[in-house]
Amino acid sequence: MEAFLQSRQDLSRLVIALESTSFYGSHIANYLSSCEVLAPFYNLVYCLNLQVIRNYKKSFIDLGKNDAIGAFVIADSACANY
């Protein structure tokens, strides 16, 4: 991850989104918020409620269900809030 971020001089912001998973999500979000590798970037970390993501997905017509589509919906939801 660090090599990728260093190779992308055009990045100034990161939006990180994850599903809220009981208390596990808060640990990951806290780590990402304070990670030294990500510190040079203006990063926003969102823990999104699963029900909110499901409702947001309904706004797209005919999306299937797989991990790639789920990741897209989560990322799009976070960027819509940004």
Image: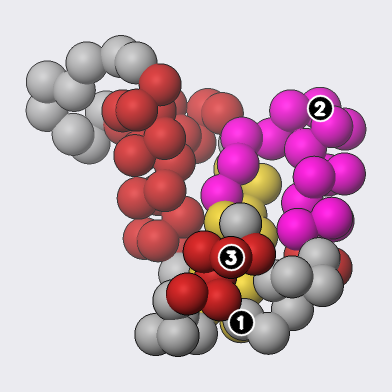
Q: CA distance from mark 1 to mark 2?
A: 26 Å
**Label 2: how many residues lie within 10 Å, few (<14), some (14-19) or many (20+)?**
few
Return the residue nearer the eye: 61 or 74.
Answer: 74
* 3 or 2: mark nearer the eye: 3
> What residue span does the magenta drawing correspond to?
17-32
Q: Position of residue 19 (x, y in %)?
A: 61, 35
Numbered-mark total: 3
Q: Amino acid at mark 1?
A: Tyr
Which secondary structure, mark 2?
A: loop
Q: Position of residue 65 (x, y in %)?
A: 30, 14
Q: Position of residue 13 (x, y in %)?
A: 51, 78
Disc nearer the start of the sequence (1/3): 3
For the point 34% across and 39% down, the residue is 72
Residue placed furthest toward the top: 65
For the point 47% across and 74% down, the residue is 7
Query: In this figure, which residue is indicated by the disc labeled 2?
Result: 22
Q: Relative to 14, say whether 9 is above or below.
A: below
For the point 35% across and 38% down, the residue is 73
Q: Relative to 27, say whether 15 is above or below.
A: below
Q: Is residue 63 left or right of residue 73?
A: left
Disc nearer the start of the sequence (1/2): 2
Query: In this figure, which residue is indicated by the disc labeled 3?
Result: 3
Query: In this figure, which residue is indicated by the disc labeled 1?
Result: 42
Q: Is residue 22 left or right of residue 10?
A: right
Which secondary structure, mark 3?
A: helix
For the point 49% across and 36% down, the residue is 52
Q: Amino acid at mark 3?
A: Ala
Res. 15 mark: none
Q: Amino acid at mark 2?
A: Ser
Which secondary structure, mark 1?
A: strand
Q: Is residue 1 left or right of residue 22?
A: left
Answer yes or no: do the residues labelled 1 and 2 have beta carbons within 8 Å?
no
